[in-house]
Image (cartoon, helix red, strand yellow):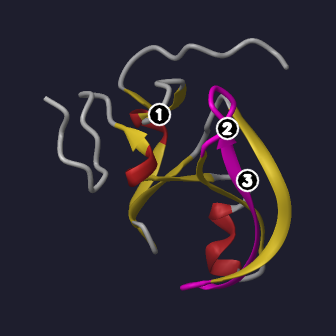
C-alpha cells in the first residue's frame, strides 16, 4: 500500500481514524441523500480503496457504483460512480460520494447521530 496523502486546507476526514479523504474545494454538490442521511459529491477523494462494481438503483436511475473505504481503518465512507447511464447524470462518473455520517468536517465537527464527545 502506498503512503497516505496529507491534504492541506479545509479537509474532510474519516470520522474513525482522521485519515484525510477530501478537500472542501472539491465539493461538487451537497444535495445528495442516502439511507444514512446527507452526503457530498466530491470531484476527488484520496486515501480510499475501491470495492467491487455493482449495479445500484439510485434516485436518478441505475448506476454502476463501487463502495469506497478509508485506507486508514477500512471503514466504508461512501461510494464512487463508475458508470452512469443517464446522459444528464454523466458528470458524476469517476466522482466520489462521502456520507456525512462517516466523515468529520473541516471544523472538526462530526455530523453523525452520536452526541458530541465534548
Where is residue 80 drawn, in percent x and y? 69, 56
Disc 1 packing (10 Å; few <14; some 14–19; many ≥20): some
62 vs 118: above or below: below
Quarter holding the C terminus is top left
| Residue at position x 19%, y 33% in the image | 117
Q: Which mark is residue 16?
A: 1
| Label 2: which secondary element | loop
Real-space CA distance between mark 3 and mark 2, rounded to the nearest whole angstrom:
21 Å
Image position of 109 (left or right of 99): left
- The mark lying in front, picked from 3 and 2, is 2
Residue 1 horizontal side relative to residue 118, left or right: right
Please report contact status of discs 3 and 1: CB closer than 8 Å, yes or no.
no
The tag earlier along the polypeptide, 3 or 2, is 2
Left or right? Give the position of 28 relative to 67.
left
Q: Position of residue 105 (x, y in %)?
A: 32, 36
Q: Viewer-proximal residue, 30 or 36?
A: 36
The residue lying at 64 percent from left, 26 percent from top is: 72
Magenta-colored span: 58-75
Q: Residue 74's mark?
A: 2
Residue 89 lies in quadrant:
bottom right
Labelled pair 3, 2 in contact (Cβ < 8 Å): no
**Contact, CB < 8 Å: mark 2 with mark 1?**
no
How many angstroms separate mark 3 from mark 1 (CA)? 25 Å
Q: Residue at x 58, y 45 (%)?
A: 43
Q: x and y percent of residue 28 in the render?
A: 47, 52
Instruction: Give the mark toward the camera: 3 or 1.
Output: 1
Which residue is found at the position 61% from the left and 43% from the top? 75
**Could you tell me residue 24's position as x and y percent?**
39, 35
Amino acid at each position: 500500500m502506498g503512503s497516505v496523502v496529507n491534504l492541506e486546507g479545509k479537509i474532510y476526514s474519516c470520522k474513525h481514524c482522521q485519515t484525510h479523504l477530501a478537500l472542501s474545494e472539491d465539493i461538487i454538490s451537497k444535495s445528495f441523500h442516502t439511507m444514512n442521511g446527507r452526503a457530498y459529491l466530491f470531484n476527488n477523494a484520496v486515501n480510499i480503496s475501491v470495492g467491487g462494481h455493482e449495479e445500484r438503483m439510485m434516485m436518478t436511475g441505475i448506476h454502476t457504483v463501487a463502495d469506497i473505504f478509508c485506507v486508514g481503518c477500512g471503514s466504508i465512507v461512501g461510494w464512487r460512480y463508475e458508470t452512469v447511464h443517464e446522459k444528464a447524470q454523466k458528470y458524476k462518473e469517476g466522482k466520489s460520494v462521502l456520507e456525512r455520517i462517516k466523515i468529520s468536517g473541516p471544523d472538526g465537527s462530526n455530523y453523525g447521530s452520536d452526541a458530541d464527545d465534548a
